[in-house]
Every structure is written in C-alpha cells, then in structure tokens.
Image (cartoon, grey):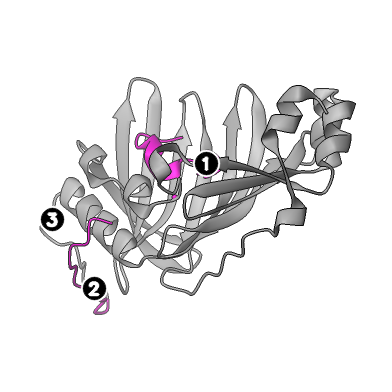
Amino acid sequence: MAANRKLLAVAVACAAAVIGVTGCSSDGDKDPFDGMSADKIAEKASKASKDAGSYRMTGQMKQSGQSSDIEFVVAESGDCKGTVGSREKGTAEFLASGKYSYVKVDDKFWEDKGDSSTAELVKGRWVKKANAKGGSPCNPDGMFKADKLKKLEREKDTEVDGRKAAVLTKKKGEETTTFYVAMEGKPYFLKVVNKGGEAPGTVNFSDYGKTVAVKVPSDDEIVDPTKISAGS
C-alpha cells in the first residue's frame, strides 16, 4: 500500500542506510520543520525511523475488496514477527529470522481455501522457507525508502494519538498517500494512510527503538514444505 508502497509492505509480504539524524525537539508552538520542504521532512523521517532500528506496525489494508488486519514488530537485526489476516478469512502468524521465514495459519484459513488435506498436514505447525537473496523481508531499508518519498506537499498539522504531527501528502492519479511525521522528539513516521489506490489502508508506527525478541520454532514445530506440495 502506499505512494511508497514499500513503506507499508506487509511483512508477510513484510521488514538501514545508517545516516546520523538529530532529533527535532518541540519548543512550545515552534515548528521544528520551519523552512523545510515536504520532501526534506520526509527524508528526515525516513532516516530517523531507520536509525531507530526496531519498531511496531499495526493497521488495516484492503486488497481485491478484502480487508486484512496487520500487526508486527521488527528487531534491529531485521528479524520480525506478527500476524496478518481477518476473522472472516483466517489469520496467519509469521516470523523471519536470519535466512528463513516461517508461516503458521489457523483453521479458518484452510476452511476458506477448502483444502482439508493440507490443513491436517500443517495443523499447528510452521512452514519454513528460505528468504529471497538470503535477506530478511523486514529489513528497515526496504520499509523506509527515502528515494521514493518525492514530490510531497505539506498540509495543515494535526495530532496522532495526542502527538503533534506534520502532514505530508503525495498524489499520483486517483491515489493519495498521507504521511504523518512526529514534531516532538525524533521525527519518526507515526502513521501512513493510503486512499484511492489498489490497496487502500492505514498503518500506525510505534515503539521505535524498543527491544524485540524473535524465537525460531523448534524442528518438531516445522513441517517440510515439500510434503505440502506432494500432498502427504
């Protein structure tokens, strides 16, 4: 989702050029971004969010008319874990660590797919697969790509969960993506909203810099993906 869809990439589809950034502090009603272009504000937000290393992402996206809830956390290493799905279509748990990703889906998911044989085979277990190019899908570099945050416009400031935020918009055809950047403390991304495109939705970012632990499933909790293909 998003004019920077990579910013909102679901990590199931999920998550640092390390460039120092100074925190923007608030001094009363003083604008910490005074004199900056919208693109420059987005650049600072991208650097700050990547430099934090870890973060939490929650929200909802819609694709092909179906809504999915998203919640996951990303560690500084790029390891991540979370859930994606819905009450109607089922939910998938996922985690990525090192060179591998793991997915475990609930019974509702297989009911919706009408695949009882596979459901019985993988019930309560994780399916393991190698990550593309050996890298984590949750690398912050892929989530917060400043080179895509161009040609933005700054709108009227607002608040996100009680925090003052600068509002930046990017329009492309009928699609509008709105980025909310913290104006107090470091200029982290707080929220991104996408409307009018193929994947509308809202994602909130929080818990920047907090410790995240991702535990890899044990061998007896993992099903061999080749057995799924074979149907046995």
SS class of the residue under badge 3?
Answer: loop
Q: Are marks 2 and 3 in contact (CB under 8 Å)?
A: no
Q: Nearer the viewer, residue 154 or 127?
A: 127
Identify the amino acid type marked 2: Gly
Q: CA distance from mark 1 to mark 2?
A: 37 Å
Quarter of the view holding residue 35: bottom left
SS class of the residue under badge 1?
Answer: strand
Select label 1 or label 3 by which is in front.
1
Quarter of the view holding residue 220: bottom right
Select label 1 or label 2 by which is in front.
1
At 84% from the left and 25% from the top, the residue drawn is: 115
Q: Does residue 53 lie above or below 146 as drawn?
A: below
Identify the amino acid type marked 1: Ala
Query: Which x, y percent locates residue 3?
Result: 35, 34
At 65% from the left and 38% from the top, the residue drawn is: 68
Query: Which x, y percent locates residue 180?
Result: 37, 53
Q: Which residue is mark 3?
A: 36
Q: Specify whether residue 136 is painted magenta.
A: no
SS class of the residue under badge 2?
Answer: loop
Quarter of the view holding residue 29: bottom left
The answer to which of marks 1 and 3 sits earlier in the sequence is 3
Bounds of the magenta segment: 1-28
Q: Does residue 20 lie above or below 69 as drawn?
A: below
Q: Which residue is mark 2?
A: 23
Q: Nearer the viewer, residue 176 or 86?
A: 86
Query: Which x, y percent locates residue 223?
Result: 74, 43
Q: CA distance from mark 2 to mark 3?
A: 15 Å
The answer to which of marks 1 and 2 sits earlier in the sequence is 2
Identify the amino acid type marked 3: Met
